[in-house]
Image: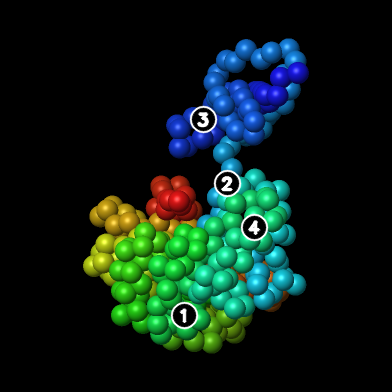
Amino acid sequence: MSDALFIEGGRVIDPANGIDGVRTVVVRDGKVAEVAERVERPRDARALDARGRWVTPGFVDLHVHLREPGQEYKETVETGARAAVAGGFTTVCAMPNTKPVNDSTSVTELVLARAAAAGLARVLPVGCISRGQEGHDLAEYGELKAAGCVAVSDDGKPVVSSALMRRALEYARAFGLVVAVHEEDPLLVGKGVMHEGPTSTRLGLKGIPAAAEDVMVLRDLSLLELTGGRLHVQHVSTRGAVRALRDAKRRGLAVTAEATPHHLALSDEDVGASGYDPDFKMNPPLRSADDVRAVREGLADGTIRTAGWSRP
């Protein structure tokens, strides 16, 4: 019996190779050997009927929280990787806000060792921008890169210092690392718990203005233009941020961005409709309907395209 697997009749969507149509995919020794409209299948070969289904390359998630080390009761590298492959994700980038945070080779190596032991999705560690995610001193980018990190981020915390952000972009560029940023001005956020607008006023809840995200995105795009580094903006949620990113990409800056499903599907109006359900409290907060439309448009026109930064 042939060891090849013929996946037949499915709609193959492979943007990297410009394929979108019904094709047969031939898999040999665990690797894609051929993609074609017509392939002669040996009688003894295995076949999988994919009619009515999509056949795609493995998905890549640039922003996951595996919580190991330190918070294994929430998630581990193995359980996260298992969930990833169940959803079609073959590569994930693990954020560094573990306990301790990933600002050292020891944490990076632990994450990679756990991933290798699991043998599921490929896990790419992301190191910290600053030591301890405290926003004062840069982490050791050279050591993090050598240990296996593909990017740096203080995810969950903004880089408040403009001077530190400039140095981060400069040093990350020297080591071929992307700087991924959580964009919010903590002084504008204050004690806010949801988007600032008519809904927050009606509910009597402290609001977070869209400008809290916008001003940080604009600052970092200015620093990116100055340094020539590579920037990735995490969980974009505002119309102003989308507009700034679109303009930056048109000017040729090396910037990419991501958006979450909930910021594409829900707005601050859903907070009121939920009856104060805390499941609707998140960071960044659910924004206005206008913001949601802008994020959707950004996704449609390629302004937000998380596959934009490469991985080694």
Nearer mark to the viewer, of 2 and 3: 2
Name the residue at 40% across, 67% down: 142
Q: Earlier in the sequence, mark 2 or mark 3?
A: 3
Whole-number angstrom distance, CA of label 1 to CA of label 4: 24 Å
Nearer mark to the viewer, of 1 and 2: 1
**Residue 131 has which mark?**
1
**Residue 115 has which mark?**
4
Determine the secondary structure under disc 1. helix
The amino acid sitting under disc 3 is Asp
Verify CB contact (< 8 Å) between mark 1 and mark 2: no
Quarter occupied by residue 304: bottom left
Residue density around tag 4, few if under 14, some if 14–19, many if 20 or more, within 10 Å: many
Whole-number angstrom distance, CA of label 4 to CA of label 2: 17 Å
Q: Which residue is mark 3?
A: 20
Q: Which residue is mark 2?
A: 59
Whole-number angstrom distance, CA of label 4 to CA of label 3: 32 Å
The amino acid sitting under disc 1 is Arg
